[in-house]
Image (cartoon, helix red, strand yellow):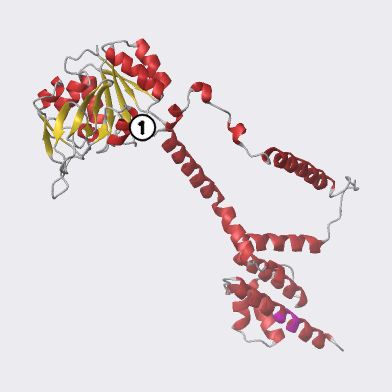
Amino acid sequence: MTATVAGAGAAARSALARWQFWIVLVLLGAIAAAAMQLLDTEDAEPYGLANTDLDGYAGLASVLDEQGVEIHRAHSAQVAADLMDEHPDASVVVLTRSFPPDEGFISELGQQHQAGREVVWMAERSHLLANALGDELRAGPPIPTGAAGTPATVGASEACTAEAAHSAENIQASGTSLQADSGCFRLEPQAEGAAAGYVLAETSLGWAFTAPDAFTNQRITDAGNAALALGMLGADGGPSGGDLIWYTPAGADLAGSEQWSSPMDHLPDWFWPLVWWLLICAAVAMLVAGRRYGPVVSEPLPVSVPASESAHGRGRLYQRSNEVTATARTLRSAHLLRLGRLLRLGPAPEAEVVAAAAARASGWDDQRVPRLLISDEVRGNSQLSSYAQQLARLENDVRDRTRMRRRP
């Protein structure tokens, strides 16, 4: 009966079989959630036009839409160039996060600005704009903050030529500045002999703004941030004609379309020999697996299956499914049937009758035998093994006593 005792491996396989549907469901849900997160990153990225968090621009985009400004988002320099051709009077906002714009695109946009197009360059880190827009800009001091971490309020300087800055009067946001010949929102130098900085600097390529935090959902209502945003982005009677091109450079813009190469070109030299070797090994393995059992052998039907094979197969099924209760019930029924035949109790005797007769024939305790054959509950594999041994011992005792009584 040891074949019916389930081991730890069988129990683990049984648990896996019972929970495999839910495991697959959880994995599919995780894959779907990851795919949605990867495919829809606009709502989560800082300064995203659909981001409703504190660092998003959803509030600004909503106000611009109410003012009649249609925002055209461009995720590559080529798309931005196509949009500029399609909307010749539209203002252009270049929001730089980590990757600088392509030099060719910067030159083209500078020419468009000289021709009258409104261009605004924005970056949280001033060195990105200083490196991208040429030698006329250098990174300046950051906007000072108070003891509680609140950014200081910076007023528009008198020499500022931007009407939007004069309308805003002042701004309050975290950010940096640029050292330039002229600009708005002047920051005094932090060290003696250092140059002053401008949060909104005037360049030959357009206006450079280094405090994009001012337009976020958290800061848009502070000081004159909203007035500056509406004035700079063409919603305050600007020449944009109701169109605004919003371009965010990405890593793909670092290479032009003619510079793209296939990923296969960057594989090591040993890659393709290894692939062919693995394919050959897989083909050989399939041939070996297909010929392992030899040719098909025909057998005459019907086939006689010994009863012992059926019993062993049923025991293995119980073992794989860890059915201790069902195994104990099968053992009990088999022993009741054999004991009834040994004691000659007739066809289909009651379990109580068999238990009483077995107790008298074996000399066992009158309470122990009924409990063993009728009401004993088995829990766990160790109890099942002990229970099977007790049933076998009872049957052997009954058989021995019965044979002794029948001898002349």
Residue at figure coordinates x 26%, y 33% from the top left:
138
Residue at figure coordinates x 40%, y 33% from the top left:
40
128 to the left or right of 17 = left
Position of residue 67 measured from the top left corner of the image (x, y, whole percent): 20, 18
Q: Does the magenta stretch include residue 363?
A: no
Q: Residue 232 lies in what quarter of the image?
A: top left
Q: Give, as a three-letter code, the residue at label 1.
A: Glu
Nearer-the-camera pick, 278 or 387: 278
Q: Which residue is denoted by mark 1 in the rendering?
A: 42
Res. 269 visible in picture: yes
Q: Residues within 10 Å of mark 1 (few under 14, many from 20)?
A: some
Image position of 5 with respect to 403: above or below: above
SS assignment for the magenta stretch, majority: helix
Quarter of the image for the C terminus: give it.
bottom right
Q: Give the range drawn in magenta.
A: 393-397
150 to the left or right of 131 = left
Q: Is residue 394 magenta?
A: yes
Quarter of the image for the N terminus: give it.
bottom right
Position of residue 176 measured from the top left corner of the image (x, y, whole percent): 22, 37
Position of residue 13 measured from the top left corner of the image (x, y, whole percent): 61, 58
Res. 1 visible in picture: no
Image position of 262 with respect to 317: above or below: above
Residue at figure coordinates x 11%, y 26% from the top left:
168
Position of residue 116 measured from the top left corner of the image (x, y, whole percent): 26, 12
